Amino acid sequence: MRKKIVTIGGGTGSFVLLSGLRDYDFDISAIVSMADDGGSTGRLRDELGVLPPGDVRQCLVALSKEPLLWRDIFNYRFENGDLKGHAVGNLFLSGLEKMKGDFSSGLQVAMKALNIKGEVIPVTESDTNLNLKLKSGEVIKGEGEINENLEIEKIGLEEISLFPSAQANPKALRAINEADLIVIGPGNHYCSVIPNLLVKGIPDVLKETKAQIVYVSNLVNKAGHTSLFKLDDYVGMINKFIGKERIDFVIFNTKKPTKELVEKYKKRGEDILVFDETDDSIKRNYKIVASSLLGEEQKFSKSDEISGVRALIRHDHRKLAKVIQYIANLSDYKGVIKKIF
């Protein structure tokens, strides 16, 4: 019987993860954040009153059985005119939403058209936005503004929430409840990962599910957001939003990027995430799976309006999926091997 794997995230992190998982014999459900309001997605939300298509677009492309064809088409961005900066896939999904009357109905058509493996599930069908309140009392409204703000860590985070509040998509709750393995991340911590955990109903079902939960750590700390974070800080915050210590495994990359890339990141005020395995001061209820997972340096379209804040490096999708397959199948070997000498 095929293992049911649920991914929770958004953006390029989900794209990378799903691109690897697609090649394995898993029953995949990709739960996607719906709080994006930056770049092309933000303009479409403002002008057409649609739900955010950007993160969903990336998941559809990743899970398509013809990914190379659809990646080039859906990710193409117009370089001039009224459509400058818009991705073809965003326009396609927004058009389907208008044609079918709601986002989920349009998404069903898109999944069929792209012949995807598995299912893409918006975490909520509510029209909502991300708000972040600093300890100074200032409220930063919208994912786009939050993503570009470099004062969050300096001033201190008071609260992060969705406004208006959003109810979970019943399909998302069902998928989590029926999962064998749940994978959270990788992705922008405050803008792609945490928003899913702010949706009413999601933390509760994560607390109760019998599935094991894996967190894929980011490769880099984000300037002004998580530049002081260590690996355990990310895990601690995710457990906090779930409301229970539920992370069972953490996947961490051990391969260091080139000196040139490290310097590029330093110019952006960002550092590679590190993990000190000799530090035994922290009592962990989760296992850390360390592996060489670094992919190639990324290149972006000149018409991409938010390329300046996108990641320069990503996980190697094949290696990441292989590690997840290993974790997913661990339970099958319980009681088989007694001891290795």
Image (tube, rainbow, N blue to C red):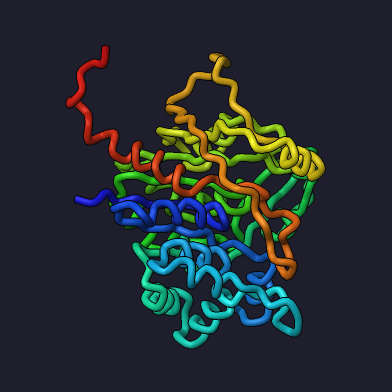
Residue 194: horizontal and vertical position, in percent?
56, 48
Between 237 and 148, the residue placed more toward the observer is 148
- Quadrant where the C terminus lies? top left
For the point 55% across and 49% down, the residue is 193
Between 136 and 36, the residue placed more toward the observer is 36
Dividing the picture into quadrants, the one containing residue 247 is top left
Q: Is residue 47 left or right of residue 97?
A: right
Dividing the picture into quadrants, the one containing residue 83 is bottom right
Q: Is residue 105 left or right of residue 219?
A: left
Between 62 and 163, the residue placed more toward the observer is 62
The extreme bottom residue here reads 99
The extreme top residue here reads 341
For the point 69% across and 51% down, the residue is 132
Say whether residue 196 is visible: yes
Q: Is residue 305 above or below residue 226?
A: below
Say whether residue 52 is visible: no
For the point 44% across and 55% down, the residue is 18
